[in-house]
Amino acid sequence: MRTVIVVDDEPITKMDLTEILLEAQFDVVAQGSDGFDAVELCRQYNPDIVLMDIKMPVFDGLSAAETILREDLAGSIVLLTAFSNADFIEKAKQIGVAGYLIKPVEARMVVPTLEIALAQSKRYMQAVGDARALKRQLEEKTLVDRAKMVVAKRDGISEGEAYERLRKMSMDKRCGMGEIANMIVASGSARETVEKAKQALIHSLNVNENTAYRRIKDYSNAKQCTMEQAAVYLMNTVSGRTVSKGKPVLP
């Protein structure tokens, strides 16, 4: 059932609206008397619609509507107003209000207005969902492309062959290609960082590759951090090193 919160500082108006909505098979889950009530009740019930007066004491309907929509506390908002001017309409549009009713409210206008608001909210949520899905797809494609390059460079194969490896790994592990690609990119980034740190230690400390790698590994074990974190720390250390007997002092 479609849920509604009714907010108005006039008890008679609240009662009349509630009766109209109940007769139309809406579920009035709560009532409030000002903007603060509206926000708190929306946090509690997350209704499909808020039917709210614009002119209320302390915290008005437009201000409350702005908070509710910004925090995604309700599906849509319909405002009640005793006047309808261009400034009000423009402000309501900017906030994202789905509709409004002029006081005194005509019973025959309430349900159609709320039905339209619900339809608009449904279309908006569908559009938001589609946009998020498209964004995830684009992000995954970018990640897979990066992973392809990492595997191709690492294993000396073409990007087409690298892609087939990723696809096979995805099937074998029964997880999405995006997840596989993320692990490979992260692993490749870590290896590159460790390699850069090794080269920095080799040149700064005049040690061989094995010794440089062992320094990174020992630091990682001692500090209980990842090899990548150890590599970054040691690179920063040698770049701003203090010298003792001709050699940098490392932790």
Image (cartoon, grey):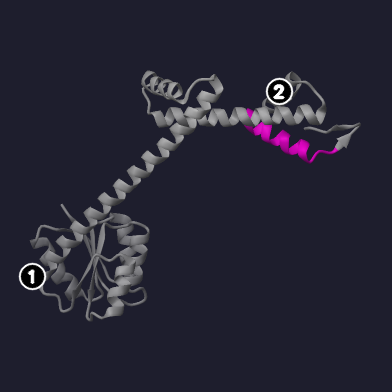
The reply to whether residue 55 is in sight is: no
- The magenta segment is 226-242
- Tell whether 64 sits left or right of 186: left
Frontmost of labels 1 and 2 is 2
Number of labelled discs?
Answer: 2
- Tell whether 35 sits left or right of 184: left
Crowd rating for badge 1 (residues with CA inside 10 Å; few <14, some 14–19, many 20+): few
Crowd rating for badge 2 (residues with CA inside 10 Å; few <14, some 14–19, many 20+): many
Q: Position of residue 42 (x, y in %)?
A: 30, 59
Identified by mark 1, the residue type is: Arg
Q: Nearer the viewer, residue 34 or 189?
A: 189
Please tell me whether mark 1 sits on a helix, a strand or a loop. Answer: helix
Q: Residue at left 68%, top 31%? A: 196
Q: Quadrant of residue 187?
A: top right
Q: Which residue is mark 1?
A: 108
Q: Position of residue 152 (x, y in %)?
A: 51, 24
Identified by mark 2, the residue type is: Tyr
Q: Residue at left 87%, top 36%? A: 243
Q: Nearer the viewer, residue 125 or 206?
A: 206
Q: Quadrant of residue 93?
A: bottom left
Q: Position of residue 105 (x, y in %)?
A: 14, 75
Quarter of the rendering occupied by the C terminus: top right
First reached walking from the N terminus: tag 1 or tag 2? 1
Q: Which residue is mark 2?
A: 213
Q: Residue at left 11%, top 61%? A: 22
